[in-house]
């Protein structure tokens, strides 16, 4: 099964994709991972991508789609895969259609107020990278793993989150409509607990 998981940042895409990968025994693929792998290879293309990322720019769609096509050709994708983080624009969705056909789009529909509350409550340990949400149980100030004082990432401020949600609405939501016209969208209420969200997804996809 070829699955595309979509939703605003904070909707739980990574958490659900990881679990679905185990349930269906198919890999989760993200463009971020592809970029990191090619950069670490030290190849000429890797150096080019690193320069682009370091400059704060986006990797061009033509490069991204080539890397993705190569990844989807691997043996572990024979039974299917879960795409997380791509496509982010309608143009990218059309490019994706040119190299593969998605079977189902899982859209994690979540209230933006919930997203802001979730992400604004995140704290990151600068030493070990552990992430904690102050809305949950545990020490709100110190890392439960190493005791280091938590910090708030610059992109986890309420203002930054709202800007990203605006971008999501303008660029990414049209992709959901694009796939709805193809009858491929499974809309899930992502305001629920992760376990309840997973239950909705598995029921919708079938085992």
Image (cartoon, grey):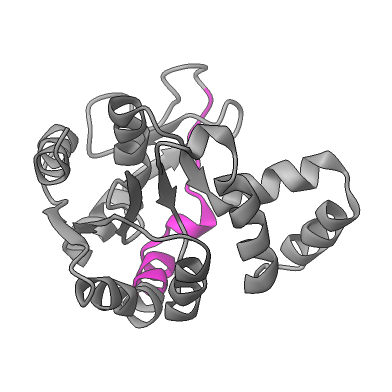
Give the magenta part as a residue range.
Answer: 148-165
The image quadrant that residue 156 belongs to is bottom left
Left or right? Give the position of 204 relative to 94: left
The one of 75 and 152 positioned closer to us in this rendering: 75
Horizontal arrangement in the rendering, residue 23 relative to residue 204 (left or right): right
- Residue, x 23% and y 33% (percent of image)? 136
Q: In this view, does 21 lie above or below 59?
A: above
Judged left or right of residue 187, residue 20 is: right
Q: Quadrant of the C terminus?
A: top left
Relative height, residue 62 to residue 79 (above, below): below
**160 is within the stretch colored magenta:** yes
User: Does residue 37 lie above or below 8 as drawn?
Assistant: above
Q: Nearer the viewer, residue 45 or 95?
A: 95
Dominant SS type (magenta): helix
**Residue 62 falls in which quadrant of the image?**
bottom right
Q: How many callouts does the rendering have?
A: 0
In percent of width and height, residue 111 lies at: 16, 63
Question: How far across and how far down the image is residue 41, in percent?
Answer: 82, 40
Q: Which of 192 and 120 is in front in this view?
A: 192
Give percent across and percent down for residue 202.
15, 38
Q: Is residue 60 visible?
A: no
Horizontal side, residue 111 vs residue 141: left or right = left
Q: What percent of the width, then of the height, locates residue 26?
A: 40, 33
Residue at (35% x, 40% y) in the render = 17
Q: Residue at x 47, y 37 (%)?
A: 78
| Closer to the camera in the image, 30 or 75 | 75
Q: Is residue 81 visible?
A: yes
Q: Residue at x 36, y 27 (%)?
A: 25
Taking the magenta stretch, the answer to whether it contains residue 198 is: no
Q: Which quarter of the rendered picture does the N terminus lie within?
A: top left
């Amino acid at each position: 099964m070829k699955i595309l998981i979509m939703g605003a940042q904070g909707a739980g895409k990574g958490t659900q994709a990881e679990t679905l990968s185990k349930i269906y025994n198919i890999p989760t693929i993200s463009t971020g991972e592809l970029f990191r792998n090619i950069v670490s290879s030290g190849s000429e293309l890797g150096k080019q991508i690193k320069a682009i990322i370091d400059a704060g720019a986006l990797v061009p769609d033509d490069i991204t789609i080539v890397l993705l096509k190569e990844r989807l050709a691997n043996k572990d994708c024979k039974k299917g895969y879960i795409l997380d983080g791509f496509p982010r624009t309608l143009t990218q969705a059309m490019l994706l259609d040119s190299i593969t056909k998605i079977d189902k789009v899982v859209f994690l529909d979540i209230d933006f107020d919930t997203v802001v509350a979730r992400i604004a409550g995140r704290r990151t340990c600068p030493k070990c990278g552990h992430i904690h949400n102050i809305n949950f149980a545990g020490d709100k100030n110190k890392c439960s793993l190493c005791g280091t004082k938590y910090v708030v990432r610059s992109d986890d401020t309420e203002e930054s989150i709202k800007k990203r949600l605006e971008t999501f609405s303008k660029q990414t939501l049209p992709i959901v409509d694009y796939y709805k016209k193809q009858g491929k969208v499974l809309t899930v209420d992502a305001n629920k607990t992760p376990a309840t969200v997973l239950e909705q997804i598995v029921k919708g996809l079938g085992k």
